[in-house]
Image (cartoon, rainbow, N blue to C red):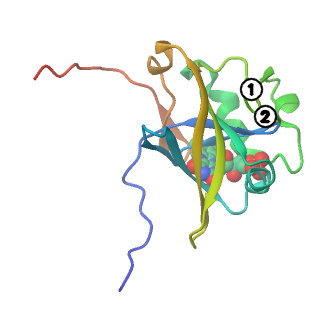
Amino acid sequence: MAKAPYRSFFYPMHLALLSVGENFMPLAWWTPVSKEPFRFLFAMDRKNHTLSLLRELEEAALSFLPWEEREWVVRSGYLSGRRVRKADRLCVALRKARRLERTWVPEKALAVYEMKVQEWPLEGDHALFLGDVLHVEGSPKAKGRPILFLGFRDYATTGETWRFRP
Ligand SMILES: Cc1cc2nc3c(=O)[nH]c(=O)nc-3n(C[C@H](O)[C@H](O)[C@H](O)COP(=O)(O)O)c2cc1C
């Protein structure tokens, strides 16, 4: 079967921050996949240091930062935890996750999902991980001014909302 080349017409994606241990990175390729049990799925580039951390610690936190914090969130995707401690380099205050043993999350996160993760083996340039949510905390403000990734180096936040009334 002939396979099509990658094309990114599906953007925007809601940008999250994935923390594993004391490292973190922006993550666009994530999605909820189950309510009961509550689970997320996300794709991790095999070149990222975070891949080794996920395999070692088997835990992660998915968090959401407001538009105002976008500069350091994005910049953390141009640094590797293999070489630098991003929290120090970017002056990001972290606090301990509530239920995870080794993971720290940004103090400014508006919503945090703490997960136990397992790899879902599949070939491809990204590894897939399923995260079972152990603890959630957040505020409705997290929906307010999200960081939306448009692809390449472009970002947006929401400008207009609409409530459907059936
Ligand atoms: C906007 C944005 C979205 C990204 N989304 C993903 C993603 O979904 N999956 C992924 O593996 N890498 C993604 N990356 C790349 C990682 O964040 C980047 O490679 C990071 O430096 C990895 O850090 P680490 O080496 O400390 O793990 C994204 C980067 C940016 C800037």
The picture places residue 2, in percent across and down from the top left corner, at 36, 84
Question: Who is closer to the viewer here, 37 or 146?
Answer: 37
Callout 1: 10 Å neighbours few (<14), some, many (20+)?
A: many
Amino acid residing under circle 1: Ala
> Who is closer to the viewer here, 19 or 162?
19
Q: Residue furthest front?
A: 36
Q: Which residue matches tag 1? A: 97
The quarter in which the C terminus is drawn is: top left
Residue at image location 47% in from the left, 44% down from the top: 31
The answer to which of marks 1 and 2 sits earlier in the sequence is: 1
Q: Is mark 1 on a helix, strand or loop?
A: loop
Point 89% across, 42% down: residue: 84
From the viewer's perspective, is 34 left or right of 126? left
Taking 118 as reference, is 59 above or below it? above
Q: Quadrant of residue 161?
A: top left
**Residue 65 in sight here:** no
- Vertical placement of residue 72 versus 151, above or below: above
Note whether residue 135 is visible: yes
Which amino acid type corresponds to the residue marked 2 in the rendered image? Thr
Query: Could you say whether the residue bearing mark 2 is in a helix, strand or loop?
Result: loop
How many residues crowd around disc 2 within 10 Å: few (fewer than 14), some, or many (20 or more)? many
The residue to which callout 2 is attached is 103
Provide residue 83's location: percent of width, then percent of height: 89, 49
Percent x, y for residue 147?
A: 51, 29
Q: Which x, y percent locates residue 30? A: 51, 46
Q: Which of 71 and 81 is in front in this view?
A: 81
Q: In which quarter of the image is the N terminus?
A: bottom left
Tags 1 and 2 touching, CB below 8 Å: yes
The quarter of the picture where residue 134 lies is top right
Q: What is the C-alpha distance between the residues marked 1 and 2? A: 6 Å
